[in-house]
Amino acid sequence: MSGELATLLSGRYVELKMLPLSFKEYASAFEGMSKEELYRNYVYNSSFPYTTELNDRRNIRTYLDGLYNTIVLNDTRL
């Protein structure tokens, strides 16, 4: 079993240590927005750092779906 698991994971395992942004860190990426709007975006768009680089909700949703599919659906099933 462990050999099969190693075969499944070989060549595609990369560890990225990433923590979500605090609200203060998230807010520092945007200027000219009210705190209410910033907080709404923080909750809705997630606090992953890369989402601050994306310019629309469709791209953010695609990124978050990709994370979910990779982590939850692919990496946790045997």
Image (tube, helix red, strand yellow):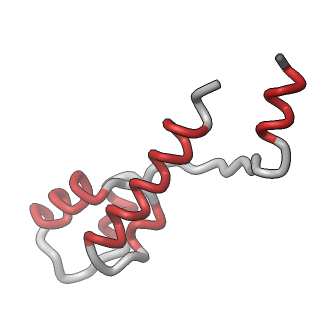
Could you say where residue 31 lies in the image, as x and y percent from the top left? Answer: 26, 81
- Looking at the rendered image, the quarter that the C terminus falls into is top right
Q: Is residue 58 left or right of residue 74?
A: left
Q: Quadrant of residue 64?
A: bottom left
Which residue is at a point 33% across and 59% down the rendered structure image?
24
Judging depth in this view, the residue of 27 and 70 nearest the camera is 70
Q: Is residue 29 left or right of residue 56?
A: right
Which residue is at a point 58% across and 50% down the rendered structure image?
18
Residue 70 lies, with reference to residue 27, above or below; the image says: above
Could you say where residue 53 lies in the image, as x and y percent from the top left? Answer: 43, 76
Judging depth in this view, the residue of 33 and 61 nearest the camera is 61
Residue 29 lies, with reference to residue 2, above or below; the image says: below
Could you say where residue 30 lies in the image, as x and y percent from the top left? Answer: 30, 77
Could you say where residue 71 lies in the image, as x and y percent from the top left? Answer: 54, 41
Q: Is residue 36 left or right of residue 72?
A: left
Q: How many marks?
A: 0
Residue positioned most to the right: 3
Q: Quadrant of residue 37?
A: bottom left
Residue positioned most to the top: 1
